[in-house]
Amino acid sequence: MKKILVVQSSELLRRYICEKLEKLGFEVLSAKDGFDGLIKLKNAIPDLVIMDLVLNRLSGMDFIREKKQYKNVSDIPVILLSNKIDRLIIERLIFYKVTKIISKPVKVDLLFNAVSETLKVPIDIDDSYSLIDIHLNEDLLFVEISGGFNKDKIEIAQYKIIQLLESAKIKYPKILIIITDIEFNQYACILLELLMNCVTEATNTPISFIKILTGLPFVKECLALSDSYKNVEITEDIKEALNSLGKGDVFAFGKELDNLISQLLSQVSEKNFEEVLDFKFSTESDKDLNSIVRSPDDKFNIAIVDDDLHILEYIATVLSENNWNILIYDTGKSFLDDFKKNIPDLVFLDLMMPDVNGFEIMQRFRSSGFTAPIVVVTAMVEKEYILKAKKYGATSYMTKPLSSEVIINKAYNMLKIKK
């Protein structure tokens, strides 16, 4: 049995990695700081170290320097997790037997593929399509899943919920689980119960405070077979679901209630914590040791495609403060004619344009092999609309009206720049 040492200051990330590795059949040792990790490294002599660059008591760089000095452990491979690494440090990492660098928030398929490649051990990760989104509105937790049930993403959801609730200091949230666009198969009931287990274990919320919003018949049929969840209320009516959770304003009606629902669903939780796990999986290779760290001073090409000249000018003005190269297009056709010559690092795209709509633009951009992030700019907040955009290649979205803070934060996030 292969032995892996996990050295990670984040309790949540450490626990997730350790529990997942144990399920995969590895012997796992864990340490919450560099000093403890170094002691366990020398005593246990693992086959692999997974560690963070930023550690307490003994820094990540000091850890791998110390490791290099001890003959018994100097050749043990290291997978390094990091937000940002200085260019000069990257050049030294080969010498210290760092074989892989995984960016944070961690894409778990990249991490476990790296473990598999390093230890020459096959590891199966569920790579089936699934979109999961989790956010809070006051004490109401939204768990949205669409496209399919992905076992690994569902397991990640449990840890992300814990992190979100701890950050917001909410102990017992009300929960609305929204399930859309999923086809029934032989594993659907098992994975649905796994989802329910992960949500309830992460929140300790009584069943009476959990509602499911879905029009999929198999959800009700599957839960009817479960002793634990057969009494969970299931509805196709979002107004009914919100009212039953105490979130529907009884004095609101018509368009006023629709606006309230849109606001609840589209609200993005304010995060004052570091995201440690990423729902998004990647078929792209993980960072190698020649990766160049991005900074705000790098010269990025940012394309803005919008037929509304006021929005076009506003986004361009906000982003131009960073001395980036701003490419503006007031028609979809002008962007399609130009993007192969002036390759963008980031695209802000309006979906509704008269000549070529945003969906066609994304389809042609992606089919040409371009992977730059696309941020959809839209006044539409319906989840079906956003999910359709993601299927066509959108990375993220912003809803109108826009603010300068949202625009710049989105650009930094998409370009993986740390402020």
Image: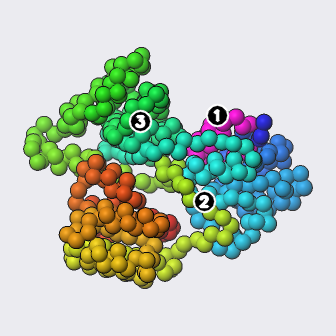
Of callouts 2 and 1, the N-terminal one: 1
* Numbered mark located on residue 285 in the image: 2
Of callouts 1 and 3, the N-terminal one: 1
Instruction: Kindly give the residue lying farthest to the right in the view shown.
Output: 71
The x, y position of residue 319, in whole percent, is 37, 77
- Magenta stretch? 4-27
**Residue at (74%, 60%) from the top-left corner?**
98
Is there a contact, CB below 8 Å, between mark 2 and mark 3?
A: no
**Residue at (35%, 45%) from the top-left corner?**
136
Q: Nearer the viewer, mark 1 or mark 3?
A: 1
* Numbered mark located on residue 23 in the image: 1
| Amino acid type for the residue under numbered disc 3 | Lys
Q: Nearer the viewer, mark 2 or mark 3?
A: 2
| Amino acid type for the residue under numbered disc 2 | Ser
Residue 283, picture quadrant: bottom right
Residue 322, picture quadrant: bottom left
| Amino acid type for the residue under numbered disc 1 | Lys
The stretch drawn in magenta includes residue 131: no
Q: Quadrant of the N terminus?
A: top right
* Residue hosting label 3: 171
In-front residue for pair 274/311: 311
